[in-house]
Image (cartoon, rainbow, N blue to C red):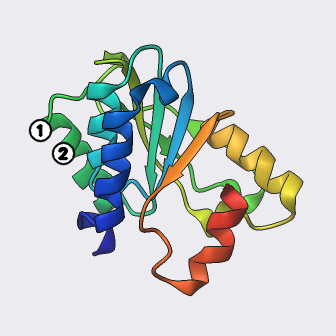
Amino acid sequence: GTGSTLWGAGFFLFDLIARLPHLFAGKRVLEMGAGAGMTGVAFARMCPAPLEVILTDHTEAVLDLMADNLRENGVRFARDQVLDTIADGHDTLADGQDGLDTEKAGGAVVRVMPLDWELVTDGGPEATRSRLETICGRVDIVVAADISYDPVIIGPSLKVV
């Protein structure tokens, strides 16, 4: 699928992180559509501490691939599971089940978690903000690369930002 492919814009985002790591120092960064996790590796290896990176994608298969790639590259992370109760109006977050503690990985604390843009943005701006803060907490920077291939997801992706 699309989340298992390294797309061109992802290489530019990786290069940005490598060239300007100081931009992310002391920030909480949310990556939308993190796919294979290449930028997560860049954040973990190249950015000065403290930094927290929340890598998100939609499907469990892509999140599994992301976790495998992070492990393969020596990046320690926590895997968070968002319970499917958001649709019922109960915003609930269950902590990581990956057997790894959240800890410093290079300069970053790295979290991997599902994020369904359409589900999170169902409702008005206040409901969206509340759901996102429950799921991810407040973030300073949102990054994304090559996520707008499907016109259906453009609206929800912009609402997340």
As helix, strand or loop, the secondary structure at mark 1 comes to: helix
Residue 40 at x, y = what percent? 33, 40
**Foreground residue among 69 and 134:** 69
Res. 6 visible in picture: yes
Identify the residue at horizontal 66%, vertical 70% (top origin): 156
**Where 44 falls versus 39 (above or below)?**
above
As helix, strand or loop, the secondary structure at mark 2 comes to: helix
Identify the residue at horizontal 33%, vertical 57% (top origin): 10
**Foreground residue among 63 and 74:** 74
Q: Quadrant of residue 22?
A: top left
Identify the residue at horizontal 53%, vertical 55% (top origin): 115
Identify the residue at horizontal 37%, vertical 24% (top origin): 47
Circles 2 and 1 in contact, beta carbons < 8 Å: yes
Which residue is disc 1 drawn over? 72
**Where 57 falls versus 102 (above or below)?**
below
Residue 118 at x, y = what percent? 64, 69
